[in-house]
Amino acid sequence: MCDRMGTERSGGPPGPSGLPVVGNARQFASDPLSFYEEVAREYGPIARYALGGREFYQLSDPELVEQVLVHQNGRFDKGEEYRRILTPVIGNGLLISEDEFWRRQRHRMEPAFHPEALAEYAPTLVEHTERLLGDWRDGTVRDVHADMMQLTVEIAAKTLFDTDIRKYEANISDALEAVMDRSEKRLERPIEIPDSVPTPGNRRYKRALSTLYEIATEIVEAHDGTGDDVVSRLLRAKSNADGLDDEQIRDEVVTLLLAGHETTALALTYTLYLLATNPEQAGRLGAELDEKAGGGPLSTDVIEELSYTKRTLREGMRVYPPVQSVIREATEPVEIDGYELDEGAVVTAPQWVLHRDPRFYEEPESFRPARWGESFRESLPRFAYFPFGGGPRRCIGENFAKQEMRLALATIARDWEFEAVTDELSLSPSITLRPDGPVKLRVSRR
């Protein structure tokens, strides 16, 4: 797939040669994950390639990733590519806002993710999971991706907005899927048909976006600003006259609906699939839950004792990271590994590569939760594993997601076991690492 471009440090990092104008777009589009792997294997810790007239620099070494996300984070932002894809959906929401406005918004939302708040959410997380399982029947086939998406959007709406999203269930599920599908296509196509052209895809996207905005607006209007949820906190901040208005609050609601549920749903989906295809590991998880989880509703105290459950989720996010690559754009000239990158250079740090790097993981493609002992975690370079990103822009909901996943997985796997009907996962990497179609598992009571 790849041919050598050049290896002189003074001439820029090495990388695959490409075609005029489109660069390496055809190679990338045919199989992005294999492209990441081959670039890392053939060209080393920093490599250069071109997509649609823009230069990309892939970092496949933990120390270089740390340079960008931590030590020199002030010289990078989310970049034009993210804004091109997401601004039409989430406006200036927390996921793509920058500088002082981003800091203020994050500060306003952080209390919703503090440990005290997480402890209060736990019964809701378990209740929603048990309610979902009430629809399962012994021996039936479920699309667990659809189930996990439903579960996590309901949890996000209830805990963060104090809203029962079920009254919008069909509309919001279809709308979220349409918007995510469109975002995926935006990423694949540097040049695309303008939204104003009335193609079937554009019409579906506009309907979906209108639905999301209507639901988000209704959620905001149902609040009076006196509660402790995220919407109430944002409403109380409106009087500060610092750019926060009803539209911005609506955009933050849409941001949290999108970002607050999909990656968690993906992590749970892939972990369930891996358990279905690895019966020995599934048996060990079941044994831990039989011994320590009891028969009643799970709590935060119980899940703290479930070490193998934690390792199972950690390993699931290693094998199939919900976000396959972090992207940043240089806001000024910057030096990385002795190379001078120009302002506007796009830097990618692919979790897909680093999470499967044989330098750090023995049998990297195997699902081995037991590997995550304390000594292994301590020996691992900081950015050899970073499913939630890193640095100041590290996911605000990381601890929320970890608690949600642990409670959900323990509640599900305590009573159910799985058999894969989908023989092999087909993946569709875009902003997140989505499955390309249903993930079908046969569910049976233990």
Image: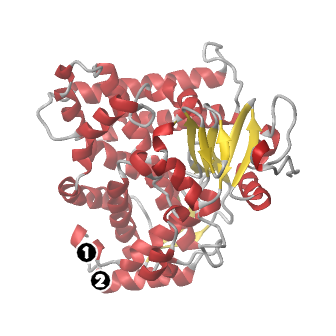
Q: Position of residue 419 (x, y in %)?
A: 57, 72
Using the rendered image of the protein, determine whether residue 46 is visible from the camera's viewpoint: yes
- Residue 19 figure quarter: top right
Q: Is residue 362 above or below residue 194?
A: below
The spot of residue 118 in percent (x, y) is 23, 56
In the figure, 212 relative to 264: above or below?
above
Q: Secondary structure at mark 2?
A: helix
Q: Is residue 299 visible?
A: no
Q: Which mark is residue 359?
A: none
Q: Is residue 185 above or below residue 262?
A: above
Percent x, y of residue 119: 20, 59
Relative vertical location of residue 405 with respect to residue 330 in this rendering, above or below = below
Q: Residue at x 36, y 71 (%)?
A: 410
- How many neighbours does mark 1 have within 10 angstroms: few (below 14), some (14-19), or many (20 or more)? some
Q: For residue 294, what is the image quadrant?
A: bottom left
**Nearer to the camera, 279 or 316:** 316
Residue that label 1 marks: 302
* Callout 2–callout 1 Cβ contact below 8 Å: yes
Query: What amino acid type should be assigned to the residue bearing mark 2?
Result: Lys
Q: Which residue is drawn at the image coordinates 75% and 31% (left, top)?
A: 52
Q: Where's residue 379, x and y in %?
A: 49, 76
Apparent side of residue 77 relative to residue 260 in the rendered image (left or right): right
Horizontal arrangement in the rendering, residue 344 relative to residue 312 (left or right)? right
Residue that badge 2 annotates? 292
Q: Amino acid at mark 1?
A: Val
Quadrant (top left, top right, bottom left, bottom right) of the C terminus: bottom left
- Residue located farthest toward the left when viewing the structure as drawn: 226
